[in-house]
Amino acid sequence: MAETLTVTQLNNRVKSILAESSHVKDIWVMGEISNLTRAASGHYYFTLKDEICELKCIMFKTHRSRIDFEPEENMKVKVFGRADIYVQRGTYQFIIETMERSGVGELYIQFEKLKRELEAEGLFDDSRKKKLPPFPRTVGVVTSETGAVIHDIITTSAKLFPADILLAPAMVQGIGAGESIVRGIELLNRIGVDVMIVGRGGGSIEDLWAFNLEMVARAIAASEVPVISAVGHESDVTIADMVADARAPTPTGAAEMALPDPVSLMNILRGHEHRASKALTHKVAMMKSRLETLTIKSDPRRKLEDIGMLQITMDNLMSRADSALKSKVQFMRSRYNVADSKISPRAAKTEIKSLGESLNSYSERLKLAIKRIIKDSNSKAEALGKRADALNPLGVLTRGYSYVTDSQGNTLTSAKALSEGSVIDVRFRDGSAEAEVKKVKNNG
Amino acid sequence: MDDEVKNMSFEESITALEELVNELESGSLDLDKSLELYERATALRNRCKEILEESERRVQKIMETSKGVETSELTFE
């Protein structure tokens, strides 16, 4: 007759079978960590798994000091210990005595080998890197649909040169990630975006591994569309980063690399605008002075008609120039209104500051010009004063000259106005004398 | 703005604008031609400005399915 046991008896029996079997103790087991919990007691609990099976594991606090890294979710490890039964629950588990990260050394060897190969092929050469387009209309992105990467790119690009974003969602870690990223890069090439960002957020070397795969490196190298890589943190350099046309430290950095800053473009536009209106103003001034010269040189009776025609043309041109310049002022106004609402407060502040500075410099220049005009007119007035002094008859009289008037006080300048017996006044600086003409002598 | 300028991309507009400004500055043009260029420069600058001030950006995702390539709006919760 078959034996009848209590649950406790069976569980204890299985426990001792396991304990006696050399097949399930002092062995290494490899797999990937999931459902990791670090209990308050300091013990670690997690599930070790491979593609098919799972194994419950415990690492007691006392063994923690034997490992020199912090276990993490998805980490590939090799654990050493024994299989056991937790009798109270009848569950099978693995008691870990020590643990190693697995594959890191292997991954490193693979990484170095691929790096050497691709480098020898010239895939990292600057000469084959494509230039990023200055003003893209569509930016493609190959990354996970759910990660922070696409979110950061969308948020950042909203403040940059307006371009559409086209995401080709891809798995960025785990089995099939490489193929998924390659498909994304190829799809965006077929659709024809202007530039693309390929990347993912930070993680362990295993998490980033897809970006160290040869197929991904080759897809980036073959891409007609320039590729900006943004993989992990700045310290993680992947093969994808080395092949990409440009490497960004973060997704935000990648968006900033792909799209120019509208504030600096506005500045460039303002520069062009300034140069154009300066050239036009100069042209108008030159034309005006030429017209004035013409007016002076021309015989008024003969050229009157020509000048009239010229003036009409000139008036037309001036009014066109005037309205052109007026619309420029309007544009400036509207731009600052727009700037107010669109540009970030910091950028707007800088713009306003620079506008203020240019206004200051204008007013400085205006002041200088006025000073110069005043100075000019002062020295002119002084010169005029001297000339006026020279003409003042009193000034002459002090030098010993006198002048002659008739009895009505009119100045006499010709001997012909006199005859014998005429009564004249001879005027000195300090008085006059009445005199009678005795004889008139005309010269010639 | 004439239709030709209206359909220009930012790159086309700013390149044309740069060329016009250089031409204007060369000083060899008569006033009438200068004004014509200035007016065109103004139109080009307005076009650049219009593009820069465009606030609408399409955010889409593209997927390859058995039916072919499908594009849809990308939204976040």
Image: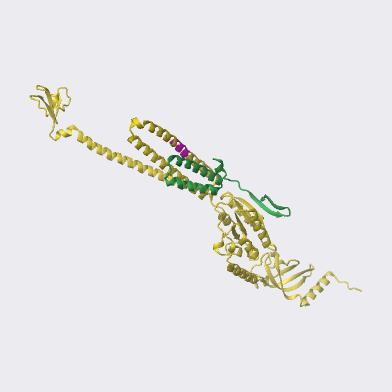
Chain colours: A yellow, B green
Could you tell me if residue A117 is visible in this image?
yes
Q: Looking at the picture, how far across and down is residue A261, in whole percent?
A: 53, 51
Question: Relative to the observer, which residue lies in front, A295 or A421?
Answer: A295
Against A420, residue B34 (above or below) is below
Q: Main secondary structure of the magenta part?
A: helix
- Locate residue A24 relative to residue A212 in the image: left or right: right
Mark count: 0
Toward the left, the furthest residue is: A438
Residue at left offset 14%, top offset 22%: A407
Locate the C terminus of chain A and report the quarter of the image it occupies: top left
Q: Looking at the picture, how far across and down is residue B68, in whole percent?
A: 71, 53
Q: Looking at the picture, how far across and down is residue B55, in whole percent?
A: 58, 46
Q: Which residues are magenta?
A: A318-326
Question: Relative to the observer, which residue lies in front, B57 or A99?
Answer: B57
- Locate residue A367 relative to residue B13 in the image: left or right: left
Q: Quadrant of residue A307?
A: top left
Locate the N terminus of chain A and report the quarter of the image it occupies: bottom right
